[in-house]
């Protein structure tokens, strides 16, 4: 718990990379970024980063180009839902890597 300037006690949290551990093999889909559609890349300035803001696992970089740490990404799809440019799509693991076996 922390305190704000008004001296009220409040609960606060912030995600940290790896806090929930690596994803392992249970993720069934993952995000793919079309960098040509991504607003920060197109405008060459930090202009959006809604994916970074809403990612519950804090695995999206706030850099140009935007990158996702797939080792910790859980595949929730929130980044794809909040992207105003529709630059992020969710791809099923089987469709992307059809030749891999268990």
Image (cartoon, rainbow, N blue to C red):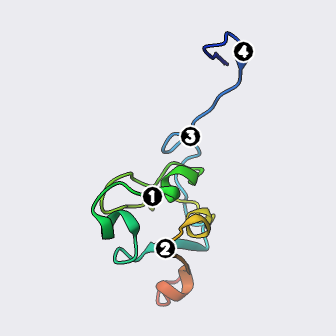
Q: Are marks 1 and 3 in contact (CB under 8 Å)?
A: no
Q: Are the residues tagged 2 and 1 within 8 Å (C-beta)?
A: yes
Residue at position x 63%, y 17% from top? 4
Q: Earlier in the sequence, mark 2 or mark 3?
A: 3
Q: Earlier in the sequence, mark 1 or mark 4?
A: 4
Residue 65: x %, y % from top left: 31, 63
Q: Which residue is mark 1?
A: 48
Q: CA distance from mark 1 to mark 3?
A: 19 Å
Q: Are marks 2 and 4 in contact (CB under 8 Å)?
A: no
Q: Which of the marked residues, 2 or 1, is nearer the chain's N terminus?
A: 1
Question: For the residues marked 2 and 3, what is the alpha-carbon distance in whole angstroms?
Answer: 25 Å
Number of the label disc, if any, that sits on residue 9: 4
Q: Which residue is mark 2?
A: 85
Residue denoted by label 3: 15
Q: How many marks?
A: 4
Upstream in sequence: badge 2 or badge 4:
4
């Amino acid at each position: 718990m922390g305190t704000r300037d008004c001296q009220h006690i409040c609960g606060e949290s912030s995600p940290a990379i790896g806090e929930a551990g690596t994803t392992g093999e249970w993720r069934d889909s993952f995000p793919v970024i079309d960098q040509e559609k991504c607003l920060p890349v197109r405008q060459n300035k930090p202009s959006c980063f809604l994916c970074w803001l809403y990612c519950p696992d804090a695995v999206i970089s706030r850099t140009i180009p935007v990158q996702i740490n797939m080792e910790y990404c859980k595949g929730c799809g929130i980044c794809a839902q909040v992207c105003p440019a529709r630059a992020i799509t969710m791809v099923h693991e089987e469709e992307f890597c059809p030749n891999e076996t268990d």
